[in-house]
Image (spheres, rainbow, N blue to C red):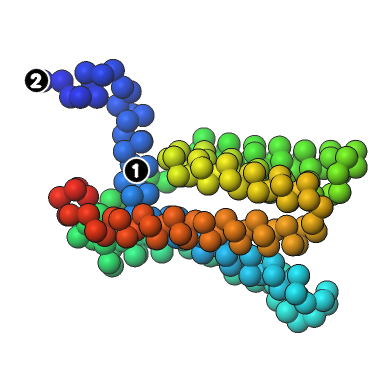
Amino acid sequence: MKPSLIQEVGVDPDAAARRLMRIAHNRDGLPELAIGTVLLTNAFLTWLQVAYPRGSFAYRSSWWGMMLGLIPMIGVSPWAIKWMRRRFLIEKVGYVELKPVPRRLLIVVTCIAFAVAAAMAWAVHLRALPPSGWMVAGTGIAWGLLAAYAGRLPRYVVGGVLMAAVGVCLGLSGVSFEMGSLILYGSMGILSLVSGCVVLLHFLRMPDEETD
């Protein structure tokens, strides 16, 4: 039997399969649209904390929205992406059942979160910069690393680098944690939505035989 192209070039078949699945999962832009929606929702809830005084109904609503709305929204996003594909894009994407999130990815994300939290706590203890600045910078770096590691595609890596850079710049600027978070989540949410829309429009314009 004639060897496949993967076997000819000596590429690990498992690694090649994971890469192809990653490309297939992100080729319609829906994951980026979901991420952008979550980030902009977070930015809106943070804006309520900036625009309204502490103790007001809007300020308290922002905290309840983050706890009771934002977290479930993140959990529902994978299901919403599958529903959108089956409802509107089934003719182009077909039926694909993706594997659960790898355990290694969950471990890496958890380690990154603990490392960032420890670094921020140590920075606050040393008082090298205002605590709010370290928190904003750490948030940008953590989300940037997560985006680059989870996406593994060039546009995700670029987005992750931009988010880390924006977070560091905001941290050094001395803005409050609320205002820094608002700018960080708002700008990155818009970027993710624009990227997702561009990818989706390009995907919809492709002939069906090219999406197989």
Query: Residue 3: horizontal and vertical position, in percent?
Result: 15, 20
* 124 left or right, relative to 181: right
**Residue at the spot x=79%, y=56% of the render?**
175
Residue to which mark 2 is pinned: 1
Q: Would residue 189 be seen by someone viewing this image from the given angle? A: yes
Q: Is residue 28 left or right of residue 134?
A: left
Can you tell which mark lies on residue 90? none
Q: Nearer the viewer, residue 73 or 9?
A: 9
Residue 149: percent from left, percent from top: 52, 38
| Image quadrant where residue 180 sits | bottom right
Q: Is residue 171 above or below residue 9?
A: below
List the single residue furthest toward the bottom. Answer: 57
Residue located at (32% from left, 60% from top): 201
* Res 142 visible: no
Q: Residue furthest left?
A: 1
Q: Amino acid at mark 2?
A: Met
Please report the residue visible at 31 percent of the width from the left and 46 percent of the height from the top. Answer: 24
Quarter containing the N terminus: top left
Q: Earlier in the sequence, mark 2 or mark 1?
A: 2
Does dot 2 land on a helix, a strand or a loop? loop
Mark 1 lies on a secondary structure that is helix
> Which is more foreground, mark 2 or mark 1?
1
Q: Residues within 10 Å of mark 2 (few under 14, many from 20)?
A: few
Question: For residue 8, which quarter of the picture?
Answer: top left
Between the residue at mark 2 and the residue at mark 1, the CA separation in whole angstroms equals 28 Å
Q: Report crowding for label 1: few under 14, some 14 to 19, many 20 or more residues within 10 A (C-alpha).
A: some
Q: Nearer the viewer, residue 33 or 198?
A: 198
Residue 116, compared with residue 41, is above or below; it is above
Q: Position of residue 94 (x, y in %)?
A: 22, 55
Choose top left, top right, bottom left or bottom right for residue 199. bottom left
Given the image, on which type of amino acid does mark 1 rest? Ile
Residue underneath mark 1: 23
